[in-house]
Amino acid sequence: MPLDAGARLGAYEIVSPLGAGGMGEVYRARDTKIGRDVALKILPESFVHDPERVGRFQREAQILGALNHPHIAAIYGLEGAGPSQFLVMELVDGETLDARLKSGAVPADEALAIARQTADALQAAHDKSIVHRDLKPANIALTRDGQVKVLDFGLAKFSGGDPGQTAAGVTHSPTLTFAATQAGMILGTAAYMSPEQAKGRAADKRSDIWAFGCVLYEMLARKRAFAGEDITDVITSIMRDEPDWKALPSDIRPAVRTLLERCLRKNRQERIGDIAVARFLLDDSAAASPAAAAAAAQPEPRTRSFAPILAASLLAAIVVGAGAWALRPSRAALPVAKFSLTLPEGQQLTTTVRNIVAISPDGTELAFVAGNRLFMRSLSEFDAHQLGGADAMTAMLCPSFSPDGRSIAFYADGSVKRMPVTGGTAVTVCSVDPPFGLTWDATGILIGQAGKGIVRCPADGGAAETLATVAQGEQVYGPVMLPDGKTLLYTIAKATDGAVRWDKAQIVAQTLASGARKTVVNGGADARYAGGRLLYAMGGIVFAVRFDPASQTVLGGQVPVIEGVRRANGANSGVAHFATADNGTLVYIPGPTTTATAAFTIALADRTGTITPLPITAAPFYHVRASRDGARLAIGSDDGGQAIIWIHELGATSALRRLTLVGQNRFPIWSPDGDRVAFQSDREGDRGIFAQRADGTGAVVRLTKPAQGERHQPESWSPDGKVITFSLVKNNVFSLQTLTIQDGKIAPFANVTSAEPIGSAFSPDGRWLAYYSAPSETAATSAASGLLNRGIFVQPFPATGDVYQVPKQQIDFQPLWSPKGDELFYVPTAASGQLAAVTVTTKPAVAFGSPVLLRARATGNRLSNETRAFDILPDGRFVGVVAPSDVVSTTVAPTQLRFVLNWNEELKQRVPAR
């Protein structure tokens, strides 16, 4: 329902409507908190319960949050009020290019200036691997001072994903499927749609380049490049017709004419491959206005030298020639081709916690496991055949081709076996536990053995040789040998609260000679080395990053290159079901972009255990903190691929408002006045502590800078606002630190260290600090102080040397003070998640009562040993994560494999190796 002037959405007062489309209504509004005008893009009410549309809306916020460019309208935040979600965006005071075209002709010099700024905006997006997909005059705004602002990234996507879907799971020409979109708007979008989009195929940055060419042509020719009375006519024109080149101004520069022709090539392999070429040709030296060209052609007085004229002519010739060279068709690069293979009816892929798909080094042979049997298919043939025939053994897992592609290794019946790809007798190589990853290279067959480390078996048979061991509680997956033949690359994950968390695994490189192990990626699994790059999975997305194997160093940031890859068992497996060949062929099993993750909700609970769920849609929540006044919650979610901090107004029915838009953000804590939230973030490459205003305005401020190999985890903010306590984590050891806000000084607190998370908490008066500690066996302790026992301790703040241990249940962790400071709450492991309470007195001396179990529980905390998933309100009620209410299912066995031929060409563009 349209909003009237004066209506309120949170802190925003509606001024007037600005427009409407298939994905949102846009209004001019006044931010009453800071007194500025903004644009609000509101998700239509009919979509608020549609997970796909809500996901797309949130995706637009993510994309805009990743962009910061003067020619792209900025985003200030994603917020909610009642059932509505809305984007708060920069208000562009001016008109759209669409309105400008309807009001009269655009002079050539003005058209080229608009095109140059639009190209700048596209370049910024493409550099972030973002494709706009809906560029048109209605989405190009012109400010009163002549500046361009590209709008509406609602249909944008990160390139490199599933060719049929965006991250939100929609088609690549979604505008044509919106039932709520008016016909005129559909027609307007269709006129700028590339041939591949019109066919429903994947859109990449060359699709944006086509649309850019359509916009530039329309400005210069004063009519659309492809027109018609209805959608069918327009699509037919796009697929069949050439633009009317005679309609271009007769005095248009040759470089601009060439640019248009190469932008509007129907075969995108012949189209300009990068918008940077357009920017180059639109520079003043290559595309001066006709007036400037005419002036340059006027004869100079004879007293002046001809040298400047000759130099200018030569420069123009060089520039235009360079442009033509840049626009030439590439003869070396083979086209990228994508297709799917669907298994016969009744046959399903066996997606276990072990890899089931492999491709030969030359890209000609495919191996996959279906129905627990191994199948082979040559890409030159129509059908697959079962390896070993009808009598083949079952449970044949972890296929891997030999380096020459003539044989294949796999695991079955308790051992690794090998067999010719043409079939024959399976030969036992070595007996091992079920593999956690298996690869065959020139040095032998590498096999992950979960908590036992990594072994190597000779390909011709023999005893297994141990290459890497792991500590207790660690597991490995996916061993790969780097090109030097002396360095292992693999994934390592640690057990948290009894479960191995592969979604928080590390990718490490280990030098075999010394055994030295170096972490190269935090938060990733199933890594592969691919010609100067690492490929690895987070959630259902494969990322690539430049990598120097000699120094074992990651260079630059991660880029998503495959979106929607099947993961087995969600966060409980290290495997991502994809494989690559030396010739650049990619094969993968499609799946969701996020892994199967338990969905939790947030609820209130009293001491009796009565639970009142809050009006918050279930999600992978793990962390909750209440503001001191109890009015708002800061909530952390982590689906294994993305960690986000949300704000919720208690007592309101509003949706969550997303606070963080960039990076992985965890462990929010409130300032005592409720104005700011501090949290851990990797947005600048490390995992330091940052602070941001809770209303989303203003800049994000860095508070700590970890040293190499460290991470900082905020825990508690003192009631006077002067100090934050945090854990400094290095080499799996937690040490309690204090940060003085005013001067940024960091100091250890009483030399408290722990082998497990500390979870410190200030008392309400700020005079005491409670924390959990689990010293290692080698930690220096005093028997008199009782610190040999792990548990919860209390110390004065600042520390005086006095230490008091809370009476133990068994192993107790996650302390929390009552609002009056007269009780401590904690989670005793002996009580199956029930909360315990113990009274505390500090005058005249520190004393504790007997622990009492409450009916309130903390069972919903799936990361209970890592972070406290509950908090307490001023009225004594608890708020926190409650037991799973839903699970995103990925248990349906898939039946499809997807292929990308010459995928290396895409990879080179997105992540250059040099």
Image (cartoon, rainbow, N blue to C red):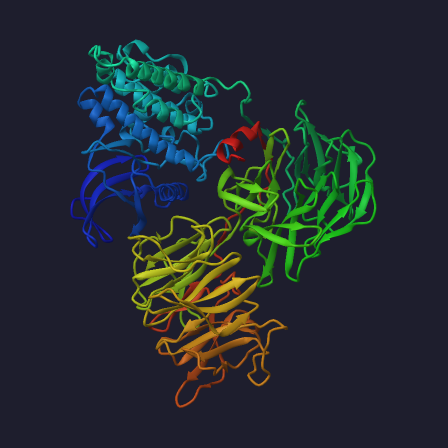
Q: Nearer the viewer, residue 645 or 714?
A: 714
Q: Is residue 773 above or below residue 189?
A: below
For residue 881, what is the image quadrant? bottom left
Quadrant of the image containing the N terminus: top left
Q: Nearer the viewer, residue 429 or 25?
A: 429
Q: Pinpoint residue 496: horizontal percent, then vertical percent.
A: 57, 61
Q: Residue at x 57, y 27 (%)?
A: 902
Percent from the top left, x then y, of residue 822?
39, 81
Task: Indicate the position of residue 546 as horizontal and vertical percent values.
Answer: 53, 40
Q: Quadrant of residue 339?
A: top right
What residue is shown at x 71% (from left), y 33% (from top)?
Answer: 375
Residue 168 located left or right of residue 449? left
Residue with the most extreme bottom position: 844
Image quadrant where residue 108 sits: top left
Number of callouts: 0
Q: State left or right for residue 488 relative to residue 10.
A: right
Residue visible at 39% across and 76% down in the picture: 763
Q: Is the residue 719 above or below the residue 415 in the image?
A: below
Residue 772, image x, y percentages: 51, 73
Task: Tell which of 513 and 603 is nearer to you.
Answer: 513
Q: Residue at x 38, y 48 (%)?
A: 661
Residue 491 seen in the current view = yes
Q: Nearer the viewer, residue 297 or 214?
A: 297
Q: Is residue 233 visible?
A: no
* Image-based side of 55 in relation to 862, left or right: left
